[in-house]
Amino acid sequence: MTRPIETAAPLSMEKEASFRLLFERHPLPLWVVAGDSLAILATNDAAVEKYGYSREEFLAMKMDGFATPDPAAVEPADAERGAWGPERSVPWQHRCKGGALLEVESAWHEIEFAGRGAVLVLAIDRTEQKRAEERAREQENMLNRASDAIIVRNLEDRILFWNQGAERLYGWTASEALGRCTVDLYVEEVDGDAEEELLTRGEWSGQLKHRSHDGRKIVVNSRSTLVCNEQGKPTSVLVINTDMTETKKLESQFLRAQRLESIGTLASGIAHDLNNILSPILMSVDILRGEIKNPESLKVLSIIEGSAERGAGIVKQVLTFARGVEGERVLLQPKHLMGELAKIMAQTFPRNIDIQSNVAHDLWTVSGDATQLHQVLLNLCVNARDAMSASGGSLGISAENVDVDEHFASMNPGAQLGAHVIFRVSDTGSGMSPETMERIFDPFFTTKEVGKGTGLGLATVMGIVKSHGGFLSVQSEIGVGTSFRVFLPASRDVKATEQREAEAGIAAGNGELILVVDDEAPIRDALVRSLQANGYQAYTAEDGSDALALYYERRAEIAVVVTDLAMGGMDGIALVRALRKVNPDVRVVVSSGHFQKENTTILSGLGVHHFLDKPYSADKLFRAVQGALGKVES
């Protein structure tokens, strides 16, 4: 930039000779310029050598012929009146003869030259400095555009550079961070081994746990490099930190998914065995109920039946969480669920908990799986019970009809328009903080003590509600209590279909021959006894190969084949395919403890329309057989 002109007194002859000698030999470009016309009166060898013009060419030029103010630094007012003159102070650009532009800082001094007023102009080339500054700015801009946090600190841990990526990751601005120590800003704990390795090997990389300005936990992949000067002495450390927080969350979710997959595989195996155990129990109960007349014995029989059904329900609940089983969808009257729920709570919950039930008498029906919806409501009630203090409290359950309109749906993600039944479970317990409420539906998250909760309950509740096309809302306040609302799509009919079907009853068989195929002897025996007790005849086969051979021999007599899906050797699907080749019109009922969607799709494609979920009662068996015979809808 131009420095202010200094006014000088006239030179004596001796001083003028000294001036000329200094002028000619000065290492920097110099010019003497006429103050009134800017004509160049003299120039030195350094100017000739640097700019490429000959002395004669310079003397034929004016100063503004190759020197102009830097356009980027000239204000509009300067452009109008010119940037020349002692009062101007702007950067300059000088053009060499070959066309190259030099960024110049200029110094002007008023002198007397050859008896006239003139100006001595000295040019200091700042081109390389400007380029270095520009490169530094470009590098800084590139570093700021990087998504990673790039930090330079000295050996005393003081921050020397802090890019915008670091600002975004940690929440500290560069002005706040510069000069401070990393342990004050984001480092939770200094890793002494890492520091030692950095100083020994010159670099280190690994995963670290950091914190942000607002206290948020951050996981980063960190790479540190020791920076040395020309003498090889360490001067600073370059640190590049990549945010891995979300990636770690995804990894954690993936591991959870793997665990759930393992649970699902284990649950499927357990469910198969338990269902094979429970099926003969339930079918035998129906047989014994027709034979036993003693009221006390019938009560014991009801207890056995209830326990077996509860065991079957638990198996279904595990499969629902682990594999997302949809369950059996039928029209249900919610007031029956609520009545059973109130009865269970009255019998099992502490007496100091005041249970209040309020169920509308004209509730609409919902389409769903009774066991799953019972699980949803019971889980919410158990959580409400556990939220109470030792002195007890109030627990309310209610159900009512509601029409969800556009305004309500817009405020509740996942909500659909139309008729719904609302189930509400509220308590006067400890309540939850906003932070806890954000995580209550996460798998394995629980606020209960070790051994008192798995963290699967509300995750399962959410899965079941969504699978039924519904949605959830929750309100809670510390010290006041919590209220859950479950919205399920409803039909405005108040009478459940399954009740009407149950009232119709099932007719007895008329001697039809049923082929029973199952690899479990107790199930085969129970099926045969149940069928024979209801007017059917039965043959049995312990696997698919035996069944196919028997059917081939007596295909004209066998009316229906009741087969298990999972069997060793030839399974149920392979058996159905083989039977279709023998008789395209064969009537088949398939049973399983765990129907996967792909299996039911394949079987439906093979013409199978009647399925039995193990364990099943004799009533469901008879309904499925008569459905296959075309006598009722199963």
Image: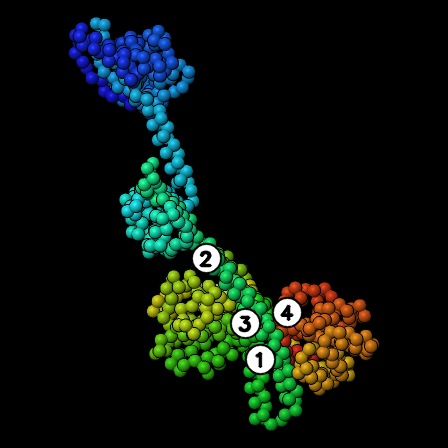
The residue that disc 1 covers is: 309
The residue that disc 2 covers is: 249
**Distance of label 1 from label 2 (alpha carbons):** 39 Å
Residue 489 appears in the figure: no
Residue 131 appears in the figure: yes
Q: Nearer the viewer, mark 4 or mark 1?
A: 4
Q: Earlier in the sequence, mark 3 or mark 4?
A: 3
* Of 570 and 474, the residue lying toward us: 570
Pinpoint residue 533: horizontal percent, then vertical percent: 71, 86
| Amino acid, disc 3 | Val
| Amino acid, disc 1 | Glu
Q: Earlier in the sequence, mark 2 or mark 4?
A: 2
- Tag 3 near tag 2, CB within 8 Å: no
**Distance of label 3 from label 1 (alpha carbons):** 14 Å
**Distance of label 3 from label 4 (alpha carbons):** 14 Å
| Amino acid, disc 4 | Phe
- Looking at the rendered image, the quarter that the C terminus falls into is bottom right
**Distance of label 3 from label 2 (alpha carbons):** 25 Å
- Looking at the rendered image, the quarter that the N terminus falls into is top left
Q: Earlier in the sequence, mark 3 or mark 1?
A: 1
Q: Earlier in the sequence, mark 4 or mark 1?
A: 1
| Amino acid, disc 2 | Lys
**Distance of label 2 from label 4 (alpha carbons):** 32 Å
The residue that disc 3 covers is: 318
Q: Earlier in the sequence, mark 3 or mark 2?
A: 2
Q: Is residue 106 above or below residue 328?
A: above
